[in-house]
Amino acid sequence: MKTQSIAEQDSAQPEPTTSPSLEFCLRLTRAYATLTRRLDNALSSVHGLSFGDFMILYYLGRSPGKRLRRVDLAERLGLTASGVTRTLLPLEKLGLVARQPDPRDARVGYALLSDAGQQLLDYALVSVQAIAVDATQTVPADQLDTVSALLGQLAGMHLANS
């Protein structure tokens, strides 16, 4: 009886097939990792921010009154309430974000973008926008809109939490 080597066994087995859904998710994850790495590198070297820090400043900057309830910020970032608290602490120490209690409900806390945070956000947006334009320069605008809408749908985004 002849035994097969591992290489022969591997070549004898059929290639596993992947569904279009799995292939999409794998490519999405790879694209996310690639973009996050590029954004992290640019933001940290030029502005001293991580991409996660930028996202906090960005969501606060887009919110009415430049503030969000901490639970709403956690939802946008895909973090737990305690995770967003840990993430906000260094930004609070730097004076980029402040805590703001709700005068009517002591259980509710807000994260508020400070003037210094807004200024840093404005500078960081220039860097992030340049990377975004470079990363999507070969994608037709109509496809970009379609994929952006699809990604928002997958993330459960709507007007109130985008």
Image (cartoon, helix red, strand yellow):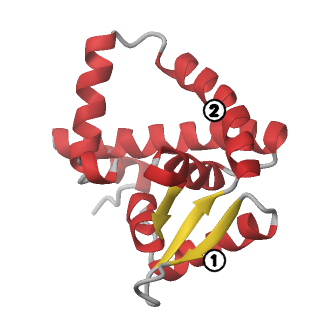
Q: Is residue 148 above or below residue 82?
A: above
Q: Looking at the image, tell me whether mark 2 or mark 1 is earlier in sequence order.
A: 1
Marking on residue 141? none
Residue under the image location 70 percent in, 36 percent down? 124
Q: Is residue 74 visible?
A: yes
Apparent side of residue 138 relative to residue 140 in the rendered image (left or right): right
Q: Is residue 18 visible?
A: no
Q: Quadrant of the N terminus?
A: bottom left
Amino acid found under the numbered disc labelled 1: Arg
SS label for mark 1: helix
Amino acid found under the numbered disc labelled 2: Leu
Marking on residue 125? 2
Q: Nearer the viewer, residue 53 or 61?
A: 61
Q: Is residue 72 above or below residue 120?
A: below
Label pair 2/1, CB-CB below 8 angstroms: no
Residue under the image location 35 percent in, 45 percent down? 26
Q: Nearer the viewer, residue 80 or 2?
A: 80
Residue under the image location 41 percent in, 46 percent down? 29
Decide: few, some or many residues near mark 1? Use Cα within 10 Å; few <14, some 14-19, many ≥20: few
Q: Is residue 47 above or below residue 112?
A: above
Residue 110 x %, y %: 51, 71
Apparent side of residue 29 relative to residue 158 in the rendered image (left or right): right
Residue 149 x %, y %: 24, 34
Q: Nearer the viewer, residue 104 or 67?
A: 104
Q: Which residue is mark 1?
A: 86
Residue 11 x %, y %: 32, 43
Residue under the image location 69 percent in, 28 percent down? 127
Q: Nearer the viewer, residue 123 or 37?
A: 123
Residue 7 x %, y %: 42, 49
SS label for mark 2: helix
Quarter occupied by residue 120: top right
